[in-house]
Image (cartoon, grey):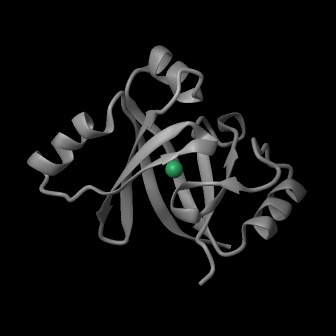
Amino acid sequence: MVKKLDHIAIAVQNVEEAARFYRDMLGLELTNVEVVREQKTKVGFFPIGDTNIELVEPADDDSPLVKFLETKGPGIHHLCFEVEDIEDEIKTLLGRGAHLIDQRPRPGAHHTRVAFLHPKGTGGVLIELSQKPRT
Ligand code: ZN
């Protein structure tokens, strides 16, 4: 079950530089800057109400984000939906014929587990599913 829009991710060259607009112009607060090794990205979150803006920069030369920035430039990169149970959601989506990039969850930021859906099957939008760690 999809619970909510967890974040909208913006591809940037540099999190701290891009953060200036959100902080200085909009008065938002940057939290949780973190390198996600498994995804070769560095991320920073601006909480807004019940959701977040995620700034995401390549943390490695072979990060998939490098190519994205080269071809498309900075801008909206993906939407992330929080799900209750990611294994269950993947199974449901595969059963419905969805085109998933990850057929099993992988580690995301803040100890989440995530899986991506291919933009080819979603009308051109890269979609991330994310399950929060169980406490
Ligand atoms: Zn994300």
When asked about the image quadrant of residue 130, the answer is: bottom right
Q: In this view, which residue lies farthest toward the right?
A: 95
Residue sitting at x 44%, y 41% = 42
Q: How many marks?
A: 0
- Given residues 108 and 128, the one toward you in this image is 108
Residue 2 in the image, given as x and y percentages of width and height = 62, 69
Q: In this view, which residue lies farthest toward the bottom?
A: 135
Residue 123 in the image, given as x and y percentages of width and height = 62, 38
Q: Is residue 61 left or right of residue 54?
A: right
Residue sitting at x 56%, y 36% = 40
Residue 114 in the image, given as x and y percentages of width and height = 65, 56
User: Dividing the image into 4 quarters, which one contains the N terminus?
Assistant: bottom right
Q: Is residue 98 left or right of residue 43?
A: right
Q: In this view, which residue lies farthest toward the top?
A: 71
- Relative to 129, residue 82 above or below: below
User: Dividing the image into 4 quarters, which one contains the C terminus?
Assistant: bottom right
- Relative to 118, residue 80 above or below: below
Residue 110 in the image, given as x and y percentages of width and height = 51, 62
- Given residues 120 and 16, the one toward you in this image is 16
- Given residues 35 and 7, the one toward you in this image is 35
Residue sitting at x 59%, y 27% = 64
- Given residues 38 and 47, the one toward you in this image is 38
When asked about the image quadrant of residue 112, the answer is: bottom right
Q: Is residue 83 left or right of residue 96?
A: left
- Relative to 30, residue 76 above or below: above
Residue sitting at x 73%, y 66% = 86
